Amino acid sequence: MTSKKTGPREYKEIDVLGAVLIRPQIYKSKPAGELAEPVDFTELGYFLGYRFDPRSMYTIWSPKGVVRGGHLEGRSKLVTVVKGSAFYVLVDMRPGDGQGVAHTFYLGEDSRAWGRSILVPEGVVDAFTATSDDFVYLSFGDRPYNAFDSTKTLDVFDPELKIDWPARTLALHNEEEKSILSRSKFIESLK
């Protein structure tokens, strides 16, 4: 993993090509509190070598221990944990040697977290579970949310993925989801 400072924030490339963890710039305010600037899109573009152009924004509130995500979205997105912490999973579904390999890390205020933000490239499935009671997540996508991206879901509890989820993690899936696929079947569905 490469770490690089290109401005007030620090960036770290992880094992998923194009995925980048970001440490925010924190400004202490008076008399108490702080102001956080998680991302500067110009600075991020300098680090990436291309412009990430946010087109939509959404927020997720999630209870502790519930797994969210597992969908292959047709867009890249920048995720920032605004409050609390999460155990985060990326599974690269793009063709190549890393296809179907899971990568895990903590994001947010957890002492095990390297940063608060992650750039998730298109073609990568992401999922998370809040590890704190009070959790808020903000995301910017380079394309608007598309409900058709959720028609199939990766079973992030598939033993083939070898994800060591935190204790007391629950799998809750939307009843309208058409299929929850194992790692192998998900990869096969992409062909």
Image (cartoon, grey):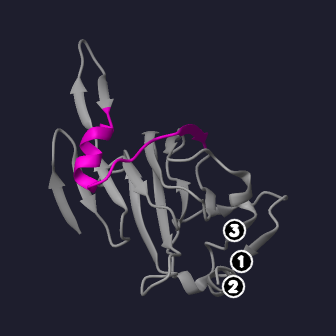
Residue 185 vertical placement versus 138 (above, below): below
- The kind of residue on which mark 3 rests is Thr
Which type of secondary structure does the marked residue at label 3 adopt?
strand
Residue 21 vertical placement versus 39 (above, below): below
**Which residue occupies 18% across, 60% down?**
3
The residue wearing badge 2 is: 185
Asked if residue 120 lies left or right of residue 167, the reply is left
Which type of secondary structure does the marked residue at label 1 adopt?
strand
- The kind of residue on which mark 2 rests is Lys
54 is within the stretch colored magenta: yes
Q: Position of residue 105 (x, y in %)?
A: 39, 63
The residue stretch that appears in magenta: 37-61
Q: Position of residue 176 (x, y in %)?
A: 84, 58
94 is within the stretch colored magenta: no
Residue 76 vertical placement versus 152 (above, below): above
Mark 3 neighbour density, 10 Å: few (under 14) some (14–19) many (20 or more): many
The answer to whether residue 172 is visible is no
Q: Nearer the viewer, residue 132 or 5?
A: 5
**CB under 8 Å between callouts 1 and 2?**
yes
What mark, if any, has residue 153 been given in the picture?
A: 3
- The kind of residue on which mark 1 rests is Leu
